[in-house]
Image (cartoon, helix red, strand yellow):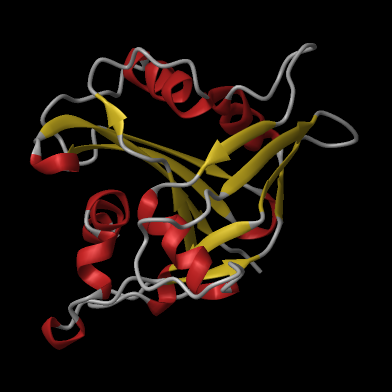
Amino acid sequence: MRPILAALLSVAAVLTAMPAAGARFPNAVEMSVTLTGEDIRDAAALLGVTGPDAKPLTLRLGRGDAWAVYLLKHDTPEELYNDEHMPPRFDTASFAATPVPSLTLGPFWLDLGTALPNPRVGEFSFGSPFLPEALDGDDPWTRLLRRLKAEPGWAAGAAPRIRHCHAADGGAQLCIEAYAVKDYTDNVERDGYGVGLILRKGR
């Protein structure tokens, strides 16, 4: 799983261009997933969608995820051959406390069962854009990462830096992970982070 997640957050475009090397970026799928159970309340709180004033979050997808969604939908007036002018893509996270704690995520996921060289059948993910090391933004991903950095399990130098997993009814599981990644926009190296949500479907 960890090599796949690192690829999702940093080198997606490279992987899709390297079939001869045996690496393949996962396909995007369109599905909405609702996870229920008491432990899911903790995952929703970490995401920031609980509480009396909480609203659904709009989460912009990272570059590799967004390109995979384009390859799924091909929904531009003219065909695109790279990700330079692709439309942004977003997922939504929303929470309902009653009648049972319920966290709904979607509509876009990467099917990790289609990735190479380490397919993970029955697992799906989506992830953030590159988040600069300063974490001075006010977007939902940056706020989530600041909460993750405040958790006692954060480990500088580890890969991932932190991993929170939450069990859902029916045997499903949702994990939230943060990784250190590098960005090379305009040939300038910058340190930062990426955040990924990984779903293991249950029965």
Q: Position of residue 122 (x, y in %)?
A: 51, 71
Most extreme residue toward the bottom is: 20
Which residue, as the protein is rendered here, is positioned at the far right? Answer: 99
- Above or below: residue 120 compared with residue 64: below
Question: Residue 136 versus residue 102: which sits nearer the camera?
Answer: 136
Left or right: where does residue 143 sit relative to residue 73? left
Q: Quadrant of residue 116?
A: bottom left
Quadrant of the rendered structure where residue 179 is? top left
| Residue 109 in view (yes/no) | yes
Q: Is residue 152 above or below residue 76?
A: above
Query: In percent of the image, x 69 and y 51: which residue is there?
Result: 169
Which is nearer the eye, 203 or 122?
Answer: 122
Foreground of the two, 197 or 187 = 187
> Would you say residue 123 is visible in this rendering?
no
- Number of numbered markers: 0
Q: Position of residue 139 (x, y in %)?
A: 50, 22
Say which quadrant the N terminus sits in.
bottom left
**187 above or below 52?**
below
Taking the image as shown, residue 165 lies to the left or right of residue 157, namely right
Q: Residue at x 49, y 62 (%)?
A: 124
What residue occupies the far front of the structure in this picture?
78
Residue 106, how many percent across, how many down?
65, 52
Kindly identify the residue that appears in the image at 59 percent across and 27 percent down.
Answer: 42
**Image quadrant for the C terminus?**
bottom right
Q: How far from the left and from the top, in percent, is residue 79? A: 49, 75
